[in-house]
Amino acid sequence: MRQIPKVIEMSISINYDPDQNALYTNATGEISLEDIMFYYSEIEQIDFKPQYSVLADYSEANADLDLDDIANMTSRRYGISRGLGVIKIAVVAKSDLLFGLARMYQGMSDHKLFEVSAFRDRGEALRWLKIFDAPA
């Protein structure tokens, strides 16, 4: 299994597994809109296969984002994924605040390009993505 690991300064790790066609993201600590936009610029450089899946695990993170920030995130995400079919994104968040933000992201995402769902449990998110041998 060939993997492309990358670590971003503000504690967002990126691991794209082309064999599974899955992007694994783990965020820890305090995450800002600037951090997420930098993350988007990093993943924009990955040569994804069509219809890839994303596990975005924010269970160890905190964020101070608002509705405008979520709108900026969804807008930026469209540019990254054009022409790649429907992308499945599972967001894992344990805190009530981040879970609520993930649900806002889910509601604001274009359902023709993205299938987004928020979860509190990583295992449940992986089952939804139909990934059964994900890295720990």
Image (cartoon, rainbow, N blue to C red):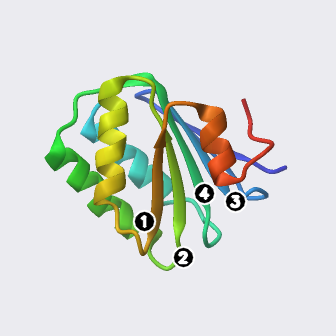
Expressed as whole percent of the image width and height from the top left, the position of residue 21 reads: 69, 59
- What SS does tag 4 mark? strand
The residue pinned by badge 1 equals 80
Q: Is residue 31 visible?
A: no
Circle nearer the viewer, 4 or 1? 4
Q: Is residue 14 above or below residue 88?
A: above
Q: Residues within 10 Å of mark 1 (few under 14, many from 20)?
A: some
Residue 85 got which mark? 2
Q: Quadrant of the C terminus?
A: top right
Quadrant of residue 55 within the rendered picture:
top right
Q: Is residue 88 above or below residue 29?
A: below
CA distance separating discs 2 and 4: 11 Å
Expressed as whole percent of the image width and height from the top left, the position of residue 73 reads: 29, 52
- What SS does tag 1 mark? helix
Expressed as whole percent of the image width and height from the top left, the position of residue 48 reads: 61, 65
Judge from the rendering whether residue 63 lies leftward or rightward of residue 82; answer left or right. Answer: left
Expressed as whole percent of the image width and height from the top left, the position of residue 77 reads: 37, 60
Instruction: Please say if the residues under marks 3 and 2 sit with CB atoms less than 8 Å apart.
Output: no
Front position in the image: 30 or 104: 104
Mark with earlier residue (2, 1): 1
CA distance separating discs 3 and 2: 13 Å
CA distance separating discs 4 and 1: 13 Å
Residue 21 got which mark? 3
Judge from the rendering whether residue 25 lies leftward or rightward of residue 61; answer left or right. Answer: right
The residue pinned by badge 4 equals 53
Q: Residues within 10 Å of mark 3 (few under 14, many from 20)?
A: some
Q: Amino acid at mark 1?
A: Ile
Instruction: Please say if the residues under marks 2 and 4 sit with CB atoms less than 8 Å apart.
Output: no
